[in-house]
């Protein structure tokens, strides 16, 4: 039975996931994915990991009986899934259950960035409406914009459906053209940035997208340009973005994710044309609970019949040996 199966919770995890893992498996906890913290007892017993922390090759090697890493979150750039595959370890993530929530947040961030709604609210709360009059008219508007999506996957498509309802044209860049949409495809990110004035990043982190939004892409976006990043902080060259926002190379940016969370560079915080959120894309109670359930259901499905619900592409062919 699964009660004899040891699952290690690494780092902070949603309490509902912890509660269910505790009821279903023999649960152990570890502060972080550090191989030095693995005792011989853990090395002998641990067969599953549940986490949203960094899980690298040395940590996987320190757990010789590890079969599965169940990642809390659809983005699994903190887990070395390529190494896991080579070690015969399954990796799962939490797609779909957060898609619409994150798309909602993206549109909120876009409107806040373009129409300065957080600043307008601060104006009211600070008594300026009564004391000084109306909030200044915003320089930017969504009207007439052309939207580019970098990473037209599950969330990108949900964002695109919302943008369609806003009456704005959509183009996108992926490595491959998506066959289920009619939006304009650009085979390069630079080509997309040249064609639009509003760029929404929903691409995953990792080596393939590292600092893809660089000075050249920002220049191509242009002086009316708006950058929204809901994907991963690592996708944007933050130094180049700070420069571009300060010099007027682009007009504004809305960011939910940062290169070194939870640290946000002071230079970014000081910029009035940056709208900054503390990584809240999926952060409602309902959606986070659904993500927690999917983490645990992946573990249960794996140990029951070796068929997890949502394996990541890198490990889709990993099989249970025992
Ligand atoms: P999907 O895998 O469905 O979509 C990712 C898209 O990005 C695909 O269309 C893929 O197309 C494209 N892509 C991947 N790598 C590259 C590359 N190197 N160059 C160009 N395009 C690329 O993922 P989801 O839509 O479910 O999630 C997307 C990301 O959103 C997550 O990985 C996560 O980082 C982020 N996220 C952020 C949240 C937040 O709270 N801010 C919450 C949830 C997710 P192709 O394979 O053809 O290149």
Image (cartoon, rainbow, N blue to C red):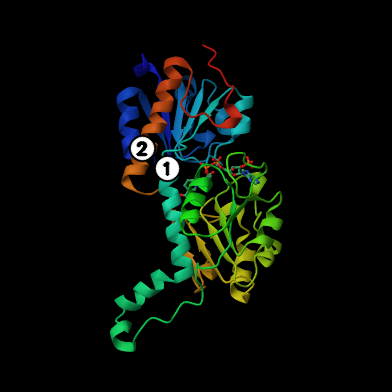
Could you tell whether 69 is left or right of 216 in the image? left
Please rate how many residues cluster around mark 1, counting C-alpha atoms within 10 Å: few if below 14, some from 14 to 19, many from 20. Answer: many
Q: Earlier in the sequence, mark 1 or mark 2?
A: 1
Q: Quick one: 190 or 282, which is closer to the camera? A: 190
> Which residue position is annotated with label 2?
290
Residue drawn at (32%, 39%) of the image = 15
Q: Quadrant of residue 291?
A: top left
Circle on res. 98 = 1
Whole-percent x, y for residue 158 in the image: 48, 47
Q: Is residue 277 visible?
A: no
Whole-percent x, y for residue 304 in the image: 42, 16
Circle on res. 19 = none
Mark 1–mark 2 Cα distance, whole angstroms, equals 8 Å
Q: Quick one: 283 or 261, which is closer to the camera? A: 283
Q: Is residue 98 visible?
A: yes
Residue drawn at (48%, 67%) of the image = 113
Q: Quick one: 12 or 293, which is closer to the camera? A: 293
Label 1 lies in ligand 1 vicinity (Cβ under 8 Å): yes
Displayed-image quarter of ligand 1: top right
Q: Quadrant of residue 82?
A: top right
Residue drawn at (41%, 32%) of the image = 295
Q: Secondary structure at mark 1?
A: loop
Q: Residue furthest top?
A: 322
Whole-percent x, y for residue 280 in the image: 41, 53
Please rate how many residues cluster around mark 2, counting C-alpha atoms within 10 Å: few if below 14, some from 14 to 19, many from 20. Answer: some
Q: Residue furthest bottom?
A: 132
Q: Secondary structure at mark 2?
A: helix
């Amino acid at each position: 039975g699964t009660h004899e199966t040891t699952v290690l919770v690494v780092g902070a995890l949603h309490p509902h996931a912890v509660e269910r893992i505790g009821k279903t498996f023999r649960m152990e906890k570890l502060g972080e994915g550090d191989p030095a913290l693995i005792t011989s007892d853990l090395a002998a017993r641990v067969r599953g990991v549940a986490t949203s922390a960094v899980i690298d090759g040395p940590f996987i090697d320190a757990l010789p009986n590890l079969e599965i890493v169940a990642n809390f979150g659809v983005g699994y750039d903190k887990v070395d899934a390529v190494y896991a595959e080579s070690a015969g370890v399954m990796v799962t993530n939490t797609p779909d259950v957060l898609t619409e929530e994150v798309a909602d947040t993206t549109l909120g961030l876009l409107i806040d960035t373009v129409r300065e709604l957080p600043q307008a609210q601060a104006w009211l709360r600070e008594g300026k409406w009564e004391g000084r009059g109306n909030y200044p008219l915003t320089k930017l508007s969504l009207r007439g914009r052309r939207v580019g999506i970098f990473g037209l996957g599950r969330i990108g498509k949900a964002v695109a459906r919302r943008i369609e309802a806003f009456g704005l044209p959509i183009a996108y860049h992926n490595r491959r053209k998506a066959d289920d949409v009619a939006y304009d495809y650009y085979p390069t990110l630079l080509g997309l940035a040249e064609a639009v004035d509003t760029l929404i990043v929903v691409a995953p982190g990792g080596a393939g997208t590292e600092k893809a939004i660089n000075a050249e892409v920002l220049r191509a976006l242009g002086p009316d340009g708006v950058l929204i990043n809901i994907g991963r902080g690592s996708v944007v060259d933050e130094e180049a973005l700070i420069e571009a926002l300060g010099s007027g190379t682009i007009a504004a940016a809305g960011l939910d994710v940062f290169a070194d969370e939870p640290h946000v560079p002071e230079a970014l915080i000081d910029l009035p044309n940056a709208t900054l959120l503390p990584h809240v894309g999926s952060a409602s109670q309902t959606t986070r609970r659904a993500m927690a359930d999917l983490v645990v259901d992946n573990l249960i499905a794996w140990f029951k019949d070796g068929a997890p619900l949502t394996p990541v592409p890198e490990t889709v062919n990993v099989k249970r040996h025992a």
